Amino acid sequence: MASAELQGKYQKLAQEYSKLRAQNQVLKKGVVDEQANSAALKEQLKMKDQSLRKLQQEMDSLTFRNLQLAKRVELLQDELALSEPRGKKNKKSGESSSQLSQEQKSVFDEDLQKKIEENERLHIQFFEADEQHKHVEAELRSRLATLETEAAQHQAVVDGLTRKYMETIEKLQNDKAKLEVKSQTLEKEAKECRLRTEECQLQLKTLHEDLSGRLEESLSIINEKVPFNDTKYSQYNALNVPLHNRRHQLKMRDIAGQALAFVQDLVTALLNFHTYTEQRIQIFPVDSAIDTISPLNQKFSQYLHENASYVRPLEEGMLHLFESITEDTVTVLETTVKLKTFSEHLTSYICFLRKILPYQLKSLEEECESSLCTSALRARNLELSQDMKKMTAVFEKLQTYIALLALPSTEPDGLLRTNYSSVLTNVGAALHGFHDVMKDISKHYSQKAAIEHELPTATQKLITTNDCILSSVVALTNGAGKIASFFSNNLDYFIASLSYGPKAASGFISPLSAECMLQYKKKAAAYMKSLRKPLLESVPYEEALANRRILLSSTESREGLAQQVQQSLEKISKLEQEKEHWMLEAQLAKIKLEKENQRIADKLKNTGSAQLVGLSQENAAVSNTAGQDEATAKAVLEPIQSTSLIGTLTRTSDSEVPDVESREDLIKNHYMARIVELTSQLQLADSKSVHFYAECRALSKRLALAEKSKEALTEEMKLASQNISRLQDELTTTKRSYEDQLSMMSDHLCSMNETLSKQREEIDTLKMSSKGNSKKNKSR
């Protein structure tokens, strides 16, 4: 389609271009003709100029001769004036010379007369030439004006054509660009289509090979392992479980719920109608409280009193039908077994209507025979009797069609599947007929109630009963209209849902097969439910990506943590070795301490035996021990400090008697404090180094990722630059082609402009020459 449209547009543009070319040729011919006319006019002007120049030359020569003659006449006159006084003096000599002067004068007069005649003839020629020049000049001016107007018209036409040419050129260029773009896109699409067709052909080949292989495999499996084809026979195919259509089941349940609500409204309206009819029989035409009613009305009221036992089962049957339609079942006419119970309840209600119909008709006749009945009331009663007959007939018709719809679930041969749609349409028509009958009953009963209210014997009880019956009739009418519209709206869906059943079959064969199918469906659903296992909770994709980025860039990556664990294990082993070393040192220190304590104890025993010598010695010993205690206290109070690489050690002087326990404790505490300090510093340094190492490792990973992304971006930049260069090359080629075309068009236009400018210059020269000639003629 697009190519055809493009060809049509191109043909139209070609036609317009050919028309413009034809017009251009006509204009060219006009321009050439005008150029020839202007050349002829130029030649005529040249000839006229030559004739004018000749006349001017002759005129100049005549004026020069006239001036010469005038000068000569003046000279002759001067000579004559000079000769007169001389003649007075020389009369004598004058007489002789007078003859000579008269002869000369006669000669001069003849010559002057000739000159005068010649001058007059020249003036006449000059006047005639002047008149002829003016006439020629006027003709040339008029022709020049016509030529100027024609030139202006031609210039306007040329300007219009140039505009049209430029517009057409622009349009053609734009169309050409669009067509080129479209052609490129179509070429790309064609290439893509070719590639797709090739891919599709390859896929078709692969699929054909795959399907052929699968077909052979499935045929071999079917031949080897399948004992029979259950879809071949309708009896076996009916047992296959169809595909579960949850939407269909929900729709059917919704429709059944709506139908249940409408049936409930209809049942309440029927109950009210029959109950209020019974009350009316007890009141009119004879009030049972005042007098006994007729045996007919007594029997009729007795039957009407039993209406609930016939009407209530309709609601129960519809409720059971609604409960049988669930999400797990398959709802078609073959599986709706509860529709049969509803049909039976409807049949019992119709039997009830048939039983009460003759009593109802006889009761209306009895009302007509009473003295209180008027002609109008009698007519309304007759209409109501006809309406009651129609109502019973409509219910019978409806019951017949519903019984037919219930047959597929009980007797499959009772109703053919092809007749389902016609039965459903007849049900809709019966419901609409029921609605029409109820409208007639409502209309006629309202008229009857209005007439009865106007009777003088009408009691308040009768008026209220009639109002109640009328309200129940109106409710029946509304319910019948709702059911009819509901069924007609869903009729297409009912007809379409009849095809819901097993594969490759017309439907379920029998209710037994449908029941077996439902059992198989329940078993299959239970089996699938047992196979279904809850899926484990999975991490969302975005969260997993975020966690991956965190793992890649976090300082607490797996490798870093593994290295930290390895280093911490090495530290623990070193600390355990150091602990064992210091445990050994502590044991050695304990052994030394025990030896020292033993030595001190031995010294104390020796000192105790020496104290038995005497009191003097005892006092001296006491004084000496006091001095020693003071010295030791001074020694303890004045410690000696020694510094080393391990730290600063505070000790007593070796010259004094040391306290062994205090010295050992001091050394032990000092070394322990120093060890704790060094281990804390070492742990801090190790943690810092591990932290820095993890950060460096994460930064290196980030750097590697950044380098990879940089390489990918550089490749993309290269591809983009290549695409840009290719597009630039294509753009330059297209620009060059367009520039060449434009240059050709501009050259053509320039040539046309040059020809027009030449014509203008020629016209200007003609104007200037005509103006110069006119000025010369004026000056002459």
Image (cartoon, rainbow, N blue to C red):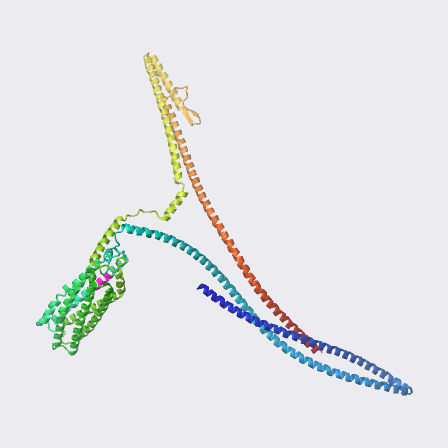
**Residue 338 counted in the magenta span:** no
- Give the answer, above or below, for where 45 lies relative to 675: below
Residues rendered magenta in the picture: 255-262
- Give the answer, above or below, for where 357 lies relative to 185: below
Q: Quadrant of residue 310?
A: bottom left
Q: Which residue is the extreme one toward the right? A: 92
Q: Which residue is the extreme one toward the top? A: 613
Decide if residue 278 is in sight here.
Answer: no
The image position of residue 667, as x and y in percent, is: 39, 25
- Give the answer, above or below, for where 58 lies relative to 401: below
The image position of residue 472, as x and y in percent, is: 18, 68
Decide if residue 562 is in sight here.
Answer: yes
Q: Main secondary structure of the magenta part?
A: helix
Give the residue drawn at x 41%, y 33%.
Answer: 682
Describe residue 253's horizontal placement relative to residue 769 as left or right. left
Please state which of residues 503 and 524 is positioned toward the viewer in this rendering: 503
Q: Which quarter of the rendered picture does the C terminus lie within?
A: bottom right
